[in-house]
Image (cartoon, rainbow, N blue to C red):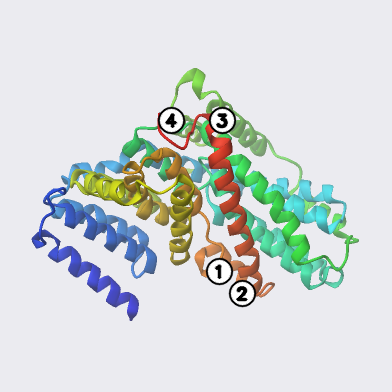
Amino acid sequence: MLKQAAVAVCFLFVLLSPVLPQSSTMGSEGWSAIAILVLAVVLWLTNVIPASVTSMMVVVLVSLLGILPFEQAAQALGEEEIWLILSMLIMGVAVEKYALDKRLAYNMLLLAGGSVKSIILYLIVIAFLLTFFMPNALGRLTVLLPVSIGMIETMKEQGGAHFGKLVLLTVTFVPYVSTIGLLTGAGGSIYAVGLFDSMLGHRWSYVDWMLLMMPIVVVVLAAMWMLLLYLFPPETAVLTGSDRFFRQEKEKLGPMTAAEKKLIALYLLLALLWMTSSLHHLPIALTGVLVVTLLFIPGIQLLTWKEAMGKVDWGVPLLFAAGFALADALNESGVVRWASGLATSLLADLPAAILAAAMMTAFILIRIGFTNYTAMVASLLPVALTFAAGSELNPLWLGMLCVAASSIGYFIPTQSAGSMTTFAMGYYTGKDYLVVGSWITLLLFLVTMLAAFFYWPLLGLSVYPG
């Protein structure tokens, strides 16, 4: 009932926005743009209606209220970031079809030799490596879950309660921690790239983003491995028979097929094109679509279009389009100019460390209410970049801090679909999740802040512009 009441108030705000007193620093549609932003945030937050429907509503409202012509609001569907996320989702469908992900998992887990510490380490490495293949944290978790449950059930007499907790908490958190490591790590990161381009005029390359964010992820994952083993020390150091289980599961997959080899070759081609973008200057979205089209070409054909249609979430482009339309609406209506002036007056005297810590903390706390990283970025990153532009800090630098903070949803299981899935299985408690998640949040906060002040400037991303 409270959700419906909040939505009703937001709709009333939208309806009354055209007649509200105008600010001298905002255009006549300023209040309407703010009202639509608030409505979108509340709808994405509460899930009263599907996110895709909310996205369509945003595009319609910014046009009906005269903020943007409909063709300008709808043209965001042609943004290259949308093509990039769709191409990566389709590549992920091919990986799932040929079980390339499971083959990777079982081959690596065989290297553990039955050591519980090594099994947890290899699970972390596998979940991290899957980030290169699947741009969706829930998709990566879905791959690892049957592998993990089969292992827990087979080894339950030896493993004890802590083994189940170690495995499930690992496959729950690592896919989400890894999202910021790559530009293609999640839809939210890909959307952020487009927003940095449209609002700040900066186009991130695949390599630049990876150099900036990947060390943060690696340090946090290494610390997380030690943290989990400290909090839930294994009752048994070595599980006899685990190698036999992994080998049996690997044998079920059969020998590597020609199709799998073709898919590996296509991924290597994609990685090569992304890594050498400074030489050929082709946009990463174009190279992504180029490689994806090869999946369907006779002679290579690894997927049918029907298979892709059935597996890909086609609501993603609508969410992206709504986010870009909102950003354009805030700019066209003068809200960006007004908020920049307000930020200048409020934030000008704050030290860089305090302002950065305050922005990250605010995003981390707001993220508690969101179940979707992309929706969080689409809702609040435009606001953060607007305020950042009004401060003395480099808005690109501060924006990347906010991107990192937007991904942190580790306090309660309802903060992500993956967490809700594993929590319902009963292997760990809400207290376990809160304790581990709080430590991971603190680690990400501290490591990101340290990287921002001491490592990022070495790569050319300085605290202050210029």
Residue 284: x %, y % from top left: 46, 31
Q: Amino acid at mark 3?
A: Leu
Kind of element beneath mark 4: helix
Question: Separation of disc 1 and disc 2 at Cα?
Answer: 7 Å
Which of the two labelled residues, at mark 3 and mark 4, occupies the earlier sequence position? 4
Circles 1, 2 touching at the beta carbon (< 8 Å): yes
Earlier sequence position, callout 4 versus callout 2? 4
Residue 430's label in the rendered image is 2
The residue to which callout 4 is attached is: 286
Residue at 48% across, 58% down = 361
Most distant residue in the bottom direction: 1
Pointer 3: residues within 10 angstroms few (<14), some, or many (20+)?
few
Q: For the residues marked 4 and 2, what is the alpha-carbon distance in whole angstroms?
A: 43 Å
Question: Quadrant of the rendered structure where residue 275 is?
Answer: top right
Q: Distance between the Cα atoms at labels 3 and 2?
A: 40 Å
Residue 459: tell me if it is visible: yes
**Can residue 187 be seen at all in this image of the molecule?**
no
The residue that mark 3 highlights is 458
Q: Look at discs 4 and 2 and give the one toward the viewer.
A: 2
In the displayed structure, does residue 234 sit left or right of residue 303? Answer: right
**Residues at discs 4 and 2 in contact (Cβ within 8 Å):** no
In front: mark 4 or mark 1? Answer: 1
1 and 3 marks in contact (CB < 8 Å): no
Q: Is residue 365 above or below residue 123?
A: below
- The numbered mark, 3 or 2, whose residue comes first in the sequence reads 2
Q: Quadrant of residue 72?
A: top left
